[in-house]
Amino acid sequence: MDTIDQKIINMLQKNARVSLKELSAACFISSPAIAARINKLEKAGIITGYHTTVNLEKLNYHAKAFIQVQLEPSQKKEFYPYVDSIPNVIECNCVTGDYSEVMEVVFETTAALDEFINDIQSRFGKTSTQIVFSTSVEHRGLHLATEDKED
């Protein structure tokens, strides 16, 4: 991967709808060459998808939290499909430490969040929850270093 590929990735992470024309102008290569590079990055598994970011509060999801779950290794076979089936689970990660899973979740109300936590506890055991008051840095892509510091 060269600096042009890095610039393409940086620009796509900022705006997945950026046009081939804009990418071409920024990278000083033709639109077909940009399209070929994007295709190559997709086939290599570097670009894995394109996403839309939404304002969850405007969609009435006012309770955001991080829930840590203490699982036994034998519970993972049941836990992973369960959390995958819950649309309110934004992300789930297997981690080190006292708790083996950390989930980011969103719910319309704290009552709905509490109901979900109670369900997790009854099915899988001990949890620890942190409710988010505010977010100082929203989810963002990883900026790849290039020679051109403006992208």
Image (spheres, rainbow, N blue to C red):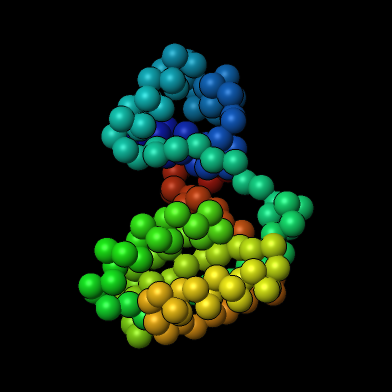
Q: Quadrant of the N terminus?
A: top left
Compared across the picture, whether 24 is left or right of 64 comes to: left
Residue in the picture at 54% in, 40% down? 51
Residue in the picture at 27% in, 63% down? 77
Q: Is residue 17 above or below residue 67?
A: above
Q: Quadrant of residue 123?
A: bottom left
Q: Is residue 113 above or below residue 151?
A: below
Q: Position of residue 130 (x, y in %)?
A: 57, 79
Which residue is nearer to you in this view: 2 or 55? 55
Q: Position of residue 75 (x, y in %)?
A: 28, 72
Which residue is nearer to you in this view: 117 or 141? 117
Q: Position of residue 69 (x, y in %)?
A: 41, 77
Residue in the picture at 53% in, 54% down? 87
Compared across the picture, whether 5 is left or right of 45 comes to: right
Query: Count of labels shown?
Result: 0
Kindly give the residue lying farthest to the left in the view shown: 74
Can residue 115 be spotted in the picture?
Answer: yes
Can residue 137 be spotted in the picture?
Answer: no
Which residue is nearer to you in this view: 62 or 42? 62
